[in-house]
């Protein structure tokens, strides 16, 4: 805002699928996404940040008192997830981590936004694997434990249509990188 005070950002909270649709229709110029996408044709993605996964448990969960939790400790637990169609890359990565740990997560509830997933964890619907950067959300009701495994990190990417960018979008990308 200081560097480009005449530019107005219109921030929208949406799922990956909705962001890709908005990009393809020209309703958005730029999106922050978690790769991979099912179809990246016509889109350009540039990694600009990364995050790690964490296990999110209700504060009253029997595992919540442990200082460290392995993913294999969650076999048989009820999971709260997001629909695969709304964020397939993230969804697939969490499932693959669970399969590598020896189980398929038993999904009992889905929510379309990460805050919704965590709200369901807070009211003890189940547990989840979430970005570690969410760890401050409802901290009194949710216990977060880092997941230190190969493949337990995510890249955040700036995504736009694969065409020349307007100057305002180019400036934003440059500033973000």
Image (tube, rainbow, N blue to C red):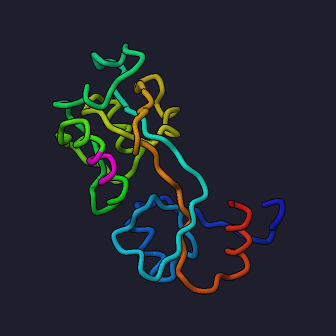
101 drawn magenta: no
Q: Estimate the x, y position of residue 151 in percent, counting from the top left.
A: 40, 45
Left or right of 54? Residue 159 is right
Identify the residue at horizontal 65%, vertical 82% (top origin). 165
Q: In the rendered view, would you say 15 is above or below 75?
A: below
Left or right of 164? Residue 104 is left
Q: In the rendered view, would you say 74 is above or below 174?
A: above
Could you tell me which quadrant the C terminus lies in?
Answer: bottom right
Q: Estimate the x, y position of residue 67 in percent, counting from the top left.
A: 42, 16
Left or right of 168? Residue 36 is left
Q: In the rendered view, would you say 1 is above or below 142?
A: below
Snapshot quadrant of residue 48: bottom right
Left or right of 107? Residue 22 is right
Snapshot quadrant of residue 16: bottom left
94 drawn magenta: yes
Q: Estimate the x, y position of residue 161 in percent, counting from the top left.
A: 53, 80
Identify the residue at horizontal 52%, vertical 45% (top origin). 51
The main secondary structure of the magenta stretch is helix
Identify the residue at horizontal 18%, vertical 38% (top origin). 103
**Image label count:** 0
Given residues 72 and 105, the one toward you in this image is 72
Span of residues in magenta = 92-96
Identify the residue at horizontal 27%, vertical 16% (top origin). 62
Q: Estimate the x, y position of residue 21 in percent, counting from the top left.
A: 41, 75
Q: In the rendered view, would you say 44 is above or below 76?
A: below
Seen as rendered, the residue at the extreme front is 150
Could you tell me which quadrant the N terminus lies in?
Answer: bottom right
């Amino acid at each position: 805002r200081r560097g480009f005070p005449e530019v107005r950002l219109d921030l929208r909270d949406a799922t990956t699928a909705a962001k890709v649709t908005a990009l393809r229709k020209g309703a958005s110029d730029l999106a922050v996404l978690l790769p991979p996408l099912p179809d990246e044709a016509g889109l350009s993605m540039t990694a600009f940040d990364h995050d790690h996964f964490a296990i999110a448990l209700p504060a009253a969960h029997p595992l919540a008192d442990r200082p460290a939790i392995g993913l294999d400790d969650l076999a048989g637990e009820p999971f709260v997830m997001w629909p695969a169609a709304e964020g397939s890359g993230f969804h697939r990565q969490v499932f693959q981590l669970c399969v590598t740990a020896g189980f398929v997560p038993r999904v009992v509830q889905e929510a379309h936004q990460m805050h919704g997933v965590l709200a369901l964890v807070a009211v003890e619907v189940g547990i989840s694997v979430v970005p570690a950067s969410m760890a401050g959300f409802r901290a009194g009701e949710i216990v977060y434990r880092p997941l230190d495994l190969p493949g337990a990190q995510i890249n955040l990417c700036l995504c736009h249509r694969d065409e020349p960018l307007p100057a305002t979008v180019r400036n934003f990308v440059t500033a973000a990188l």
